Image: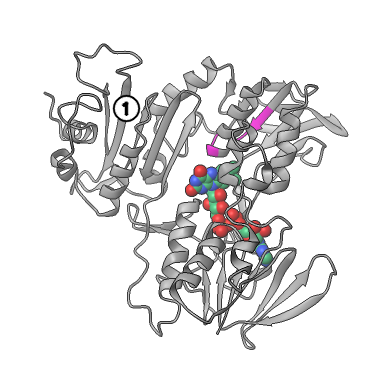
Amino acid sequence: TKVVVVGASHGGHQAILELLHRYDNLDITMFEAGDFVSFMSCGMELYLENSVTDVNDVRNFEPKQFTDQGVHVLNNHEVTKINADKKTVTVKDAKSGELADYDYDKLILSSGVTPNNLPIPGTDLENVALMRGYDWATTIKSKLEDSSVKNITIIGAGYIGIEAAEASRKAGKNVTLLDMLDRPLGAYLDSEMTDILNKHLEDKGINVVMGATIKSFDGDGAVKAVTTDKGTFDSDFVIQAAGVKPNTDWLKGIVNLTDRGFIETNEYLQTNLPDVYAVGDATLTYSIAAQAKMPIALATVARRQARYVTQHLFEKQPSVPFKGLVGSSALSVFDYHFATSGLNEASAKRNGVTVASSFYEDTLRPSYVPEGEDNPKVYVKILFDPQTHRLLGGGVLSTYDITAEGNVLALAIQNEMKVEDLAEADFFFQPGFDRQWSLMNLAAQHALGESK
Ligand code: FAD
């Protein structure tokens, strides 16, 4: 039985791990268009900040790990077409330029996304970068190490833009962070938390310019400035982190795509073609909180989808549909750490979900421990259905690492628990760690209007 996997990133990696674990005697082939196999963009900031020094270590797997087990891992091989009638894929060998067809019984697509250039003049200038994958990682790193690069401008204040800004600042650069939204991380966190983080970014010396329309990248050969409606910013290097495009042009007219180019899948993660499945950033995910499909571009999502697909790959009719996910993520912003799960006010609005919300502020430990480094401030935001009190989303933030509480919230949302359940959940108390009631208990009680 031949299984073909397209893309060697999180979705493809997990698919192969699962296939090898679950089944014997499969003939597995992975095609990867790029040269470097399985660069882990999630680990790029650690590389840029020198926590990991060899770029070749920033990867999900080395091909040998799988080729030793009989898997064919073909890099520099781009799949250009699916021939569903013959159950073959056409593949272009980037080195020789030759095309060849390969048979499949089952085909798993995890072709992911590519970051967008802004639709403005100057994106083709030298020293304008994107931030994903091996090649851009090494380019960005070389610019951070180049003392002639003084001013770096980051376009987009989402997760990736924030990582770029922090790494650039830590490398001693003058950093301007631009976004069209009115606050950094505005697509991920509500304003109570972004207010704190905006100030913190400024305290760390980043020039935070929000609500900006970016007009052009200017320069002669190489970029020299970024022009916006809020001023012109000197720039020796620009990193664009403002949106992505699914790698699905090659599937047009073959596999059903949404109008934005995402691969359409059913509740079994099957495409419209028999025995062709799709996972990862190139697809939409069913959000348990929104009860709708949406892009949730996370490695965690790709891996859970790949696990589901391989579990049910050889069932005539999959025994259970994919349950959906909540979408959980975390990030450090200099001295702060946050984690978030499910919906926020912006994504709830976008999906037409009515939410009630509560913002809770406290200290980590009981009040007899003086507030400060040993007893820092902690913040929790909870979103829930105003009628049923079902938990729909939220986040946690502190200078202390309370991100594990974000996973508590994720579990509660995924299991469709109510605010009342979280208010009463039996969590530990130990004053070295928390208060007489655990933080999530207190935040939920606060959401129920209880003040004690
Ligand atoms: P991708 O990672 O997009 O990879 C797709 C692969 O398929 C590519 O290697 C591509 O070359 C290949 N390919 C495409 N088309 C073809 C074709 N036709 N033939 C052959 N090969 C093809 N997520 C988290 O959960 N946590 C994090 O901390 C995190 N941090 C991130 C930091 C950065 C800077 C970035 C950029 C992303 C981060 N993400 C994080 C998101 C995460 O990287 C993605 O969600 C994840 O990589 C998606 O995996 P994927 O398999 O869908 O596709």
Measured from the top left, where is residue 365 in percent x and y? 24, 22
Outermost residue to the bottom: 86
Q: Is residue 412 above or below residue 443?
A: below
Q: Is residue 3 above or below residue 141?
A: below
With 274 as the anchor, is 402 left or right in this view? Answer: left
Outermost residue to the right: 220
Q: What residue appears at the point 62 percent right and 88 percent down from the top-left corner?
A: 85
Measured from the top left, where is residue 112 in percent x and y? 59, 58
Residue 373 in view, yes or no:
yes
Q: Nearer the viewer, residue 334 or 389?
A: 334
Residue 247 in view, yes or no:
no
Instruction: Report the quarter where the N terminus lies.
Output: bottom right
Q: What residue appears at the point 68 percent right and 35 percent down from the top-left corner?
A: 239
Instruction: Report the quarter where the C terminus lies.
Output: top left
Q: Residues within 10 Å of mark 1 (few under 14, many from 20)?
A: many
Q: Nearer the viewer, residue 368 or 449?
A: 368
Residue on which disc 1 sits = 379
Outermost residue to the top: 370
> Is label 1's Cβ within 8 Å of ligand 1?
no
Q: Nearer the viewer, residue 223 or 205?
A: 205
Q: Quadrant of residue 434?
A: top left
Measured from the top left, where is residue 11 in percent x and y? 53, 61
Q: Is residue 367 above or below residue 155?
A: above
Q: Nearer the viewer, residue 162 or 212?
A: 162
Which type of secondary structure does the marked residue at label 1 adopt? strand
Q: Quadrant of ligand 1?
A: bottom right
Residue 56 is inside the magenta segment: no
Q: What residue appears at the point 59 percent right and 66 percent down from the top-left corner?
A: 66
Range drawn in magenta: 153-159
With 7 as the anchor, is 398 left or right in this view? Answer: left
Measured from the top left, where is residue 425 in percent x and y? 16, 42
Q: What residue appears at the point 41 percent right and 33 percent down from the top-left corner?
A: 338
